[in-house]
Amino acid sequence: MTTRMRRFGLYALLALVGVTMVGPLYWLFTSSLKQSGDIYTFPPVWWPGDLRWGNYAEAWRAAPFGQFYLNSLITTGSGALLEVANAVLTAYAFVFLRFPAKRVLFAALLGALMVPGHVTLLANYLTVADLGWINTYQGIVIPGAASAFGAFLLRQHMLTIPIEIIEAARADGAGHLRILFRVVLPLSRPMLITVAIVSLVSKWNDFIWPLIVTNTETMRTLPVGLLMLKDADGYVNWGSVMAATVFVVLPVLAVFFVAQRQIVAGLTQGAVKG
């Protein structure tokens, strides 16, 4: 096979992957501008002849999306901040501190990566209910404030920091807090941004936990609020639902486009050292 044919095959494969990834987003945006019945027609209508911008106004009026945005911003922002802080402290401890049973605890951290999140739903709900946190921001945020995945990624990155830099800081009299904030965190910026964005997207899109732990309209988040677009008879105006889904997706896309360079740098930076 010639070099030109291999290159053509590679470009064709990349184009196929690109279409597969962008296609659902294209379908979402175009469907948000269609009549509800046009979404099911076959052959499919790839671009609506009559753009129905009113779907967005109908979706906004059908539910208090302003309150849902506020709830999502509060729970996502505070949850991601706590998760990143926990991950930084955990990773620093595993790399730069000596303490008993360190290997056993790290094995437990790796084990936590294998446990599906839904397994802990019941235990978390009972704990939150006992604390009286049902229908509160802390009830939504605190159970997800620690992440084994983020701690593992940061730990793997911190292992790549030359130990000579840490020893030089200690020789200058720096303590652990100063080493963390003046040396380790500045060198870990791409990985920190990656962990933060993964956490933000995960919490912004979370549906099950906010649905379980809240029971009033004023505490619902955006993904849960989409359920309110179904009327009492079970009828769903899919044009409005697609428009409301755009409300949920747009902030995530904005974060990705702003920080995509840092995401790629973080994921390709020193995540393989054991």
Image: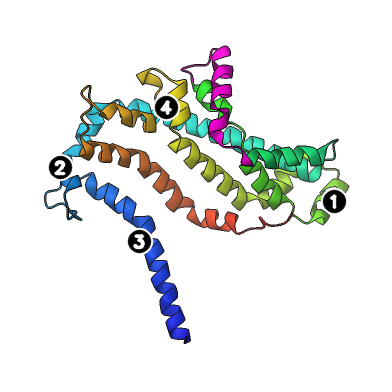
State the separation of the CA atoms marked 3 and 4: 33 Å
User: Does the magenta stretch mainly form a helix, a strand or a loop?
Assistant: helix
| Residue situated furthest bottom in the rendering | 2
Secondary structure state at the residue bearing disc 4: helix
Q: Residue at x 29, y 37 (%)?
A: 244
Q: Which residue is mark 2?
A: 37
Residue under label 4? 71
- When the figure is inspected, residue 65 is found, relative to residue 175, above or below; the finding is above
Q: Is residue 88 left or right of residue 134?
A: right
Residue highlighted by disc 3: 19
Which element type, helix, strand or loop, lies under badge 1? helix
* CB atoms of marks 3 and 1 within 8 Å: no
Q: Is residue 198 magenta?
A: no
Query: Circle 1 is placed at which residue position?
Result: 167
- Which-is-in-front pick, marks 3 and 1? 3
Give coordinates of residue 237: x percent, y percent. 20, 35
Task: Say which of 10 and 136 sits in front.
Answer: 10
- Real-space Cα distance between discs 3 and 1? 49 Å
At label 1, the amino acid type is Glu
Circle 4 packing at 10 Å, graded few (<14), some (14-19), many (20+), is some
The three-letter amino acid code for the residue at tag 3 is Val
Between marks 3 and 4 in the image, the one whose residue lies nearer the viewer: 3
In the rendered structure, which amino acid carries the disc numbered 4? Asn
N-terminal label among 3 and 4: 3
Numbered range of the magenta stretch: 114-136
Image coords of residue 186 (percent x, y): 67, 49
